[in-house]
Amino acid sequence: MSSDPIQTFLDECGELLAVMEDLLLNVESNADDPEAINTLFRAVHTIKGSSGVFGFEHVVHFTHRVESVMDQVRAGERALDAELAAVLLDCRDHISQLVELAAADPAAALDADLEQHGQALLTALDGGSPATAANAVTTAGVVEATRSGGGAIEGNNWHISLRFHADAFRNGIDPLSFLRYLRTVGEVRDTLTVTDRIRDAQPFDPEDCLLGFEISLQSQANKGEIEEVFAFAQDDCEIVIVPPQSNTGEYLALLDRMPEDELLRLGEMLLGAGALTQRELDQALAAQNTGDQGEGAATRPLGEILVEQNSVAQPVLDGALQKQGKVKAKLQRDAQLIRVDADKLGQLINLVGELVTASAATELLARSEGSLLLQESLAGMNKLVSEIRDNALTLRMVQIGETFSRFRRVVRDLSRELGKSIALEIDGGETELDKTVVESLSDPLMHLVRNAIDHGIEAPAVRAAAGKPEQGTIQLSAYHDSGSIVITITDDGGGLNLDKLRDKAVNRGLIAADVQLSRRELMQLIFAPGLSTKDQATDLSGRGVGMDVVKRNIESARGSVEIDSELGRGTTITIRLPLTLAIIDGFLVGSGNEPYVVPLDNVVECVELQKDDWEVRSGRHYVNLRGTVLPFVRLRELFSLAPHGNAEERENLVVVRHGRELAGLVVDRLEGELQTVIKPLGEMLAGLRVVSGATVMGNGRIAMILDVEELVRAASRGTKALAPALTALQ
């Protein structure tokens, strides 16, 4: 067997197991959500079916038992409480182990410990208490059935209408024998003999069978079993079997529980639910095919015929049609999706980047040639290239919510381990960003969430003493801002004790005892290597290892991380990352003889810098921008560049934004917008803080992509601190 089908199976199981985990964690707070329960059942059912295709019997056996329990939950026979949800979560983990083992070696026997653990889980599943609801199956939409001979059917029993054909006696049929045999499948509660055909028969023939019966039967048998009683008389009588009124709800529940991986015909669905027998379906199909249909007439709907011949109640038909439409919509959505290897997407993005560069080079050549027709043609091509770029980048965009949802299990398990009560709230899960950025976020987010659980949220007794709710809250949120994605991790725990943090930093020699730090600078100490606010180390944290790695990983993805905390109120950590690491819209500027690129999303406006509007205070530059004091940095001075041409030529101020902070960049020239393919810096420039990457322009020159965050910081605090890092560019 090739590895491709197995890998597809593993990928599908991984997605379904993730769905199981997410739904079970949600169901703990909303156990009455029928859609969540149905989706959970389908996930287990699909894993079982796929495992059966590959002959993974251990997986099939275990998931079958889990599926049976979920079927009881769906039918209302068992309550999905916190205890059962916890067992099902453990079952989910066990299924994951079984799948990995089976995929690695289908013939491998189960490890004794693994098998014992599985048996213990199945025992725990069987120990669940059934739901105590007196009526677990809904009877919504029940309609009043009527006798074939007229009048309502009384009671909650099966009703059977029999009309024997005139030749029944001649064919050796004894109607009473069938009535006697009917007692073997239930209790006959009432029998009414219908004799209207005797009165209407002219002339009367004593050998004709003109009898009819209306029978009320109380039985646990299904429709097919009752119909079997009359198997030998089906050609000599007309039979209509109407289920009890309570069965309508049961049929609807059975229809709802049908798998959604295959679109069934209406008759097949009703047969599968037990609401229809094969004889009734054949009769309806025959009536549909032999009906009075002139040329161009539409075929009568099968459902209409089934209701007309009393084979199916209207609510059951409506339920089947609704289920059929739901399955069709799901299959149509699935058909629109295709699984693509991430490496192939990466190759596509790289090729699009090269196309952008080649397009820019062709545009420069057209300008130098002075051909207007060529330039017009290139303008159309550039528009198409831009659309291709945007669509290619969209292919690699994923929602952050899937990453956020993985932490539900982390919060649940660790909070229980630590004896804490913590709720996880997610906001902005639909926010999209590049898959490569998401991958770089996984480990930092995991560490920050674990820190919030261990360091941030206090024990219930401590929270109660402080006047807080015993249950703590961790919130993960995401939103777009100025071409970046902003992710915040907020807890309502104890917050940072800045005095304690400063003392620890002094004791570890990270800062001098007499140095004065701002509140922001004190909080940033938490990212220093080896520094922890915990007095004792635990299995989770407390050794001062991790926060420095978090910051380093985020900065390596061209991002930034900030922390804000209030003692006794909680902590918020803010991560800002670019939406994509591949291609951006840039704004090209020139300073001295060098070109630079500013990410266009960070550019607010461009104005001419007037000599009378700026001044220097304490080594920092400020400009009066329409009555607002704006710090700025002059790129020529920052990079020690020689003047370009006339040193007295005018200068331009590019106003940029990072988060809520504004600053100005003074440049010599404004070159306009361009599509920028981001290239990573080499090892020699890897530590350069004011440059985040480089790009190749159409004329072959290299332009540095400026790091707006560092430049805003330099403009606000002065550029002296950046001097050591700038020597690499000089």
Image: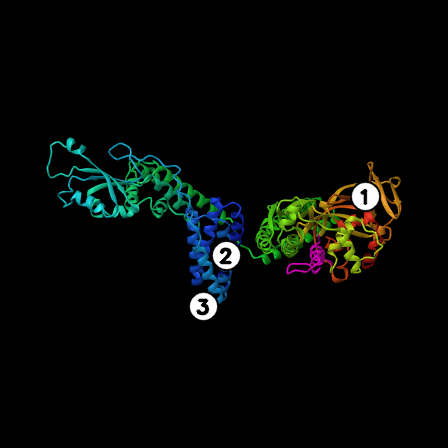
Q: Which mark is residue 653?
A: 1
Quadrant where the C terminus is found in the figure: bottom right
Image coordinates of residue 417 in percent, x first then y, are 59, 56
Q: Amino acid at mark 3?
A: Ala
**Quick one: label 3 or label 1, which is nearer the N terminus?**
3
Front tag of 3 and 2: 2
Residue 114 appears left or right of 576 = left
Residue at which label 2 appears: 92
Residue 673 appears left or right of 194 = right
SS label for mark 1:
strand
Q: Nearer the viewer, residue 254 or 530?
A: 530
- Characterize the local packing of mark 2: few (<14), some (14-19) or many (20 or more) Cα atoms within 10 angstroms: many
Residue at which label 3 appears: 107
Measured in 3D between alpha carbons, the distance from the residue under mark 3 to the one under mark 1, in whole angstroms, is 71 Å
Extent of the magenta region: 531-559
Q: Amino acid at mark 1?
A: Leu
- Does residue 248 sit above or below 405 in this rendering? above
